[in-house]
Amino acid sequence: MEFEPHQLGRNSMDDRSNLPVADARRLVRGLTRPNPVIYWADFLISITVAYGALTVYLTAPLFSALQVATFSLTAFAMYRISLFMHELVHFKKGEMTVFQVCWNIIAGIPMLTPSFFYESHIAHHNTHHYGTRNDGEYLPLGNGALRDLVAYAAQVVLQPIVVTVRFLLTPISFLHPKLRQWTLERASSFVINFSYRKPISTNAPRRAWAAMELACSLRAWVIFIAPIVGLTTWSRVPQLYALAVAILTLNHLRALSSHRFLSDGDRMSHSNQFSDSTIITGNLFTSLICPLGQRYHALHHLIPSLPYHNLAEAHRRLSSELPADSPYHKAVYPSYFAVLREMRTHYLTHQSEADQIKRRWYETDLQSDTITMPSPREQPENLSASA
């Protein structure tokens, strides 16, 4: 299919309201069950590569070619491992429980990324909250406000510090119920939209969360205690910080291409979610920036129940079976940079509207809504009705 520039603007999203959801589900039938062998093999190989490269990176001569090479390898491997959080959140209740526990013990806690910090992702699929200020993974980045892009980029530098301090101070949060509630609501989610407030249900697994938090707190303290008692040198701290910044840079680059970010704060239908998202065919570079099926992000929003290892086959089926004029094809971009070029074009042509859109986005009153956490792999129509 020859690539044509995408139409831009909110109206272009409405043009795709005839998205063939029923046909899409029929075509991907049989692809929604996760394969434990693939998950375990991918994770164990990735973690072996990551920790092996990390060991060399931390012990190699500073700024040597070996250290630079292993720094890059460690960053890409750990970035891939961190994206398993997305898969964990989408598992059904009771599905691959051992894998989830092992991921947290082997990767999540050592990397200060416990999986429950990503449960806010479920609201990102909810049609009552996607693209609104109740969506922790969304900002109006495509509508021409330069300061929003600068703030988004600054998160890469600041988040490792904020997260580390948060876990260093974790024990204090247990001193008072109100402080604990504030910590869970305001400081227990990996988000780019800091106005997001995490809903805490009455049956939330607070003990399990507390166990993961305290383990992460211990890990954070070890980072600083180790050089104090002479187990490592102080150079280890900036080395780990540089690695965290590199991983977050990769993640923010990926996230920037996952959506068109054209919401003005109003609720968006399931079809508009899809049209505000992207599918990138790309090449090796795309695979590195968007691992674990992240290049098929619009398809993931269309059918969230698809595990990452089946997204490529699902896309192949839909691309070949859906009519040439299907709205599905309008979400497909030939490269990562094609997405950024479109965003830049829209950004440059809408600067005069940026302040108005941003003000509307932050002021839209959605507080009457209650964000609920449905079963993560529910179908989109159920997600739409869940809040």
Image (cartoon, grey):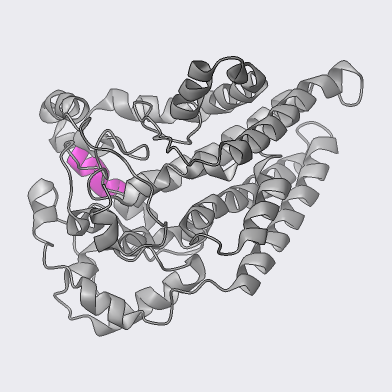
Q: Quadrant of residue 5?
A: bottom left
86 part of magenta stretch = no
Left or right of 203 on screen, residue 276:
left
Q: Give the residue drawn at x 27%, y 33%.
A: 133
Residue 265, given in percent of the width and then of the height, sits at 18, 36
In x, y percent, where is residue 230? 92, 20
- For the residue pair 201 and 6, the one nearer the viewer reads as 201
- Asked if residue 40 shows in the view, the reply is yes
For image coordinates 58% across by 33% down, the residue present is 245
Is residue 112 visible in the rendered structure shown here? no
47 vs 239: above or below: below
Q: Is residue 1 above or below residue 16?
A: below
Q: Looking at the picture, how far across and down is residue 20, in whole percent?
A: 18, 73
Residue stretch rendered in magenta on the structure: 340-347
In the image, 75 versus 5, the foreground residue is: 75
Q: Residue at x 75, y 23 (%)?
A: 221
Question: Closer to the camera, 177 or 350?
Answer: 177
Q: Quadrant of the N terminus?
A: bottom left
Say whether residue 383 is left or right of residue 252: left
Residue at horizontal 54%, vertical 42%? 116
In which image quadrant can residue 109 be found?
top right
From the top left corner, tell me how far across and down residue 45 is, in percent: 72, 62
Query: Does 223 sit left or right of 15 as displayed?
Result: right
Is 134 positioned to the left or the right of 216 in the image? left
The secondary structure that most of the magenta stretch takes on is helix
- As for residue 341 lying within the magenta part, the answer is yes
